[in-house]
Image: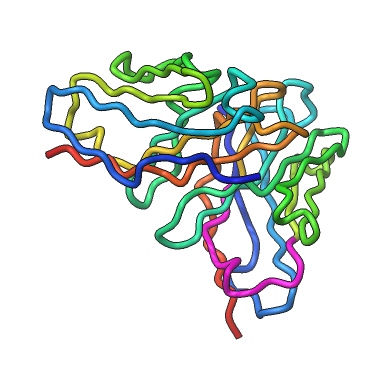
Amino acid sequence: QSALTQPVSVSGSPGQSITISCAGIRSDVGSYNLVSWYQQHPGKVPKLIIYEGIKRPPGVSSRFSGSKSGNTASLTISGLQAEDEADYYCSSYAGDSTLVFGGGTKMTVL
Amino acid sequence: QLQLQESGPGLVKPSETLSLSCTVSGDSIDTSSYYWGWVRQPPGKGLEWIGDVFYTGTTSYNPSLKSRVTIFVDTSKSQFSLKLTSVTAADTAMYYCARRRSFFYYMDVWGKGTPVTVSS
């Protein structure tokens, strides 16, 4: 079971859109629509922002959206705001009742 | 409103066993809709799934930790617990307990986390 691959860092200016990729393999991301995304501000608890690849929990801004193509899932943040600066983690079902996280991406608002 | 609260020693000696508990309040732990799990985060690093438990006692573990991990549930106390044996400095981390949706593998409620340091 290997960690999902995310870029170490991404950045964007306020108002712009950015996309964070999450590359897996056929037996995890590629086989199931069970990717979730978490936002973690420094020193804070991770917060679920996307589940089942594309769904948002109540209260999460519509500026966050998820998608998938093949073995790669993506998180897009549109209309970047200063408060979006955080670490973002993807995770996926990986078969045999296990779960795997990505390495995390530090998102900076310029 | 569901709340999860971790508890346990913040300092564990190398080669000993790390033991943590998570108390569930505000909702029932014996529900078929959720599993109850543990995630850790070493200082400055990413999240790592440790494993989870169903209220019936059924467990799932991260293959890389499976030989050292036990997760069990006590429904009478609304608690689930983690034991990690033969710890080393690499097990130093913030440990979070979390609720995981059955079948859908996302964690929607997290505890505040408890820091554990492995040191003599």
Q: x and y percent of residue B106 in the render?
A: 59, 28
Q: How is the image coloured?
A: rainbow
Based on the displayed image, in which of its 4 quarters is residue A45 positioned? top left
Q: x and y percent of residue B56 in the render?
A: 87, 33
Instruction: Say which of A66 and B53 sits in front.
Output: A66
Q: How many marks?
A: 0
Which range is magenta?
A: B84-96
| Residue at image coords 37%, 17% | A65
Instruction: In the rendered view, tell whether residue B91 sits above or below residue B20.
Output: below
| Residue at image coords 66%, 33% | A94
Q: x and y percent of residue A71 in the render?
A: 53, 25
In the image, taking residue B15 as reference, residue B111 lies left or right, namely: left
In the image, taking residue A6 as reference, residue B64 lies left or right, namely: right
Instruction: In the rendered view, tell whether residue A92 sits above or below residue B40.
Output: above
| Residue at image coords 17%, 37% | A109
Based on the displayed image, in which of its 4 quarters is residue B32 positioned? top right
